[in-house]
Each structure stands twice: as C-alpha cells, then as structure tokens.
Image: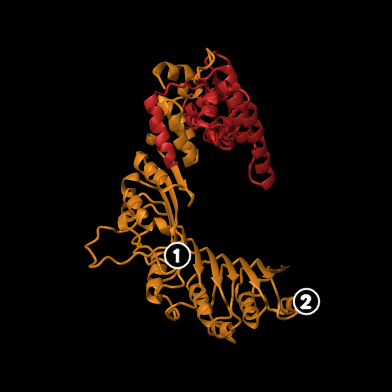
Chain colours: A orange, B red
Amino acid sequence: MSREEHRAKRRRLPAGEPDFLAALPPEIVDDVIARLGIRDVVRTSALSRAWRRRWESVRGLDLSFRSSAPAAAISSVLKRAAAPVRRLDLRIPGRRFRRAVRWLRLLPRKRVQSLDLHFEFVFGEKPNLDPSFLSCLELTSLILEGCIFPPPQPPPPSTFVGFPELTKLSLSEIDLPIGELPRLEDAIVFASAIKTEVLCKILEGISHAETLGFDAITDQFNGNPPERFSFTFQNLRSLDLHACLDQISSTSWVFCILRCAPNLETLEIEVDCDDDEVDAGSVEGFANAQASDDIFPRLRDVWLHSIDCSSNEMCFIKFVLSKARSLELFSVRVTSSRLSYQEACIEMAKYKRASPLAKLRLIRG
Amino acid sequence: MATGSGAAAAAADAEEKESGSRMITLTSNEGKAFVVTEASARQSATIRSMVDDGGCVDKGFPLPNVDSKTLARVIQYCDEHGNKEAHTVDERAALAKFDKDFIAELDADKAFLYDVTMAANYLHIQGLFALTTQCIADTIKGKTPEEIRTAFGIEYDLTAQDEEEIKEEDTHA
C-alpha cells in the first residue's frame, strides 16, 4: 500500500471531537489501564502512536492469563511490562512446563505483589519450581499448585530469609522453605503426599496465621501426625478442614490441630470419605483422650458438611457440643444417613451442650 | 455570660466536633459556596487532612480546580456516603444502588464524567475515584481498537510500520 493510500485509509475523526483520554492526567489513565484485563491492556497498543507503549509503564497491572493464552503472548507481556506488577496468575499446561521456567526467571524484576502459579496435573510429571520467585520480596499473596520445590543440592548459603510482606499463602503438595512470614494472616496447605515431618515443619512456619485451610485426608501420608505439635496456632481464629472422620489418620490430624488452637472461633469441616472402610471408634479414642482438657474455649461457630451420620461423625458432634462452652451455632449438613434422618436428628438433639446458648441446625441435602 | 453556660457551650462544641456535625464551606472556582456536613467533606482525604491539621474550618475551603457544576455532583456523592450509615446489609445495598445510578447518569455525559473523575482525584475521594475510573475502564473492555478510538476520540495516526508491528504482536495474542 502506498503512503497516500495509507493516509487515505486513516479514519479521521469529525473535527472538534476531543481525545478525552489524552486530556486526563496520566495518573488517572494509569488507574484506568490497571483496571483492565491483560487482553484489553495489550489491545490499547494498537490505538495510536501515543498508545503504542503506553501500557508498559503502568504500575499495578493484573497479568492473569488463562491456560489457553498463547505462550508467545505471555512471553511478550512479561518482557514488556516494565512497572511493578500487582498480580501474575498463570495456569500452566504440561506442554509449557519448560517454557514456564523462562517466564519465572523474568519475575524478580517485576516486583509482583500477588503470584498464583498453577501447574496443571500431568500424570507422572511434576515440574520443578524455579527458585527465582524467592526473590519476589514484595509478595503479599503466594499461591502455588502442582509443582515441586526441590531442596537445592548442595544447599547454598541462601540469602533467602522469607517474604516480609506476605499475608496470604496457599501451597498444594509443595515442600517449600517458606522462611519468615511475619505478616501472614491466611494460609492454605493441601499436602496429602508430603512426608509428615516436612508437613509439620510447614505448619510450624505458618502457625501464626489467623485463618488456616488444611487438607487432612491422609491415605498417602507417610505416617500419622505427632502426638502433639511442638508449637501452637496461637492466632488461629478460623479453621477450614477437609477430612474423613472415619479414618484414624485423618481424624488424628484433625485433633492434633484442634488441640493446639486455643483461640479458635470458627471451624468448618468438609467431610469426604471416598472409600467405605471405616475405622471403628476413630473419633472416640481421641475424644476420650481429650475428656478432661479444656479444648476450644472460644469456639462459636461450627459447620460440618456432607456427613452421612456414621458413628464417628455422630461422636465428633457429641464431643464438640460437650466441650465448646462458647458455642453459638453448630450447623450440620446431612447428605445421606446411615440412620434415618429423623433418628439422627433425635439423637443429636439429645447430646449435652456445654454452652447454654448453643443452637444446633440440621440441613438436609 | 455565666461560666456555667460557657462551659456548656464548650462541651457542646466538643460534642459537635466529636460527632462530626460541624458544617464546612467549599467554594468552587466560580466563587460559589457550598455548605456541607463535616462527615460529607471528610469523604475527601484532601479536606480531611486539612481539617485534622486544625485548618481554616471557619473560613471554608476554596477549590480552585473544581467548577460549580462538578462540585455539586461530587457533593451529591459525598453526602450520600458521608451522611448515611453503611452497617447493615440493607444500608450497604442502598449505597450500592446509589453508586450504580450515579455512575450510569455520569456515563451518559463523558465530558462531565472526566470532570468528576479529575475532581475525585484532586480531592482524593477514593470511592468516587474508583467508581469513575472503573466506568472509563468498562468503556474500553472487550472493544476493538477501532471501537475504542471512536469512544474516546483518539486520532488514528499509526504508520504502515506500526501496523506491521501490531500485526506481528497480534499473532502472539
């Protein structure tokens, strides 16, 4: 196309129509751009000459990519984004595991605040997480899933001490040297395949969190938890567990945490037992061992989801009602029932309640 | 004046200060005065810090960067958010409804929307600023470059070489 043709092709605007965005102060335009999704952000570079590289210097961009995003687009954005990034969210399918290493090596200079790396499941292959993210000291939120973080061989005299700003941490199946996390508030640990001693170490590192999500379904665990942790969850107010009360190993993790959480106020347990094997009396043993102790004195609100009223589950409900002296509401969702639903209701209503205010709410379905 | 009533007046003064029910005068760049409650004025971090620094509450605050029309609209927002409670679910829903109607009306008049945005930025009214910039961002969302140019009056001045580069970048995205 000749220059003249090209010029003719340009779409001229009606005279007098002002360029509104250009008239706004740059910090306002930055704020607007930072509110866009990454595809819209990149598209602004095709608006006009002034816009060609405008977005690259915007602080606080949200770089959230879907797993279908082209790899070249991700590489290009990561290279071009020149200002501190608010959020980087990558879903990485198996064919991109190698490429992801190169992306992660671009991280340290991005001053990312929120990092969410989700490596999609590939049978028999878990990628090694590149240690470059350890230098993202401005992280306030870190979510890692589906990768392994191997201890470096030999361990270097690491300068990594922790993430000073981190308030939220979520680890799935990752053995991470988390270091010091002085500002941590929310932690989630899903780690059914991690060795018990490593898991205890991770829990100790996050034991000052205010909320904890923990997967206590444990059939792949290398052993049961210790009798008692050497630490307490002193700040823990809210605990969200995934557990099977019909399994001794899972139940022992539940009690192990509950015993060490003296300030717990809300407890939510999603019950999930996929095999029919029931360890008879799994709860009863722990409950009896706890009989004389003051456990969860501040517990106010309990949610128990998806129970089928097995004797262990009923025993757990009985135990909590008999112990939680500040309890206000105990909600139970019964999905199926070994007893008839009515029988289960009558049975539960009979349990002694340590708190005179405690209400029991049963939901069917 | 008896000492007793003087003390009572001082106490009333203190109480008034405490409850934020003092009135504050804001003056537009056209010299028009708007009298608002302190709670309303405190929506602006700029005015809030001047008030807290013991500034000239009695003399009022001249706002040389804001015209009367814009200021009236900004005050409408501040009154709603400063004078009303937002404790219950219903109260918060009412405020959200107010915000939605407020921004829909502004969105219909882009030039005015930008004036309000700039005033919110200048006065550091965080909620209003977020509301207006999000509205501008929503105008860009999901649109083609051509549609964005039309919406914002951006002149097309890309060279053939730019177009080549953009095409190249597009094959990535």
Identify the residue at the far right of this view.
A342
* Badge 1 or badge 2: first in the primary sequence: 1
The C terminus of chain A - image quarter:
bottom right
User: Three-letter amino acid code at disc 2?
Assistant: Gln
The residue nearer to you, when weighing A18 against A136, is: A18
Judge depth for marks 1 and 2 and give the one in front.
Answer: 1
* Viewer-side residue, A176 vs B124: A176
Q: Quadrant of the N terminus of chain A?
A: top left
The residue identified by callout 1 is: A122
Q: How many marks?
A: 2
Picture disc at residue A342:
2
Q: Is residue A187 above or below residue B42?
A: below
Between B133 and B17, which is closer to the camera in this rendering? B133
Crowding near the residue tagged with mark 2, few <14, some 14–19, many ≥20 C-alpha atoms within 10 Å: few
- Label 2: which secondary element: helix
Answer with left or right where residue A302 lies relative to residue A41.
Answer: right
The Cα–Cα distance between marks 1 and 2, rounded to whole angstroms, is 45 Å
Circle 1 chain: A
Chain label for disc 2? A
Quadrant in the rendering for residue B104: top right
- The answer to whether residue A179 of the structure is visible from this angle is yes
Name the kind of residue labelled 1 in the image. Val
Q: Is residue A137 visible?
A: no
Secondary structure category for the residue under label 1:
loop
Q: Position of residue A195 (x, y in %)?
A: 39, 75
In the figure, A251 relative to A110: above or below? below
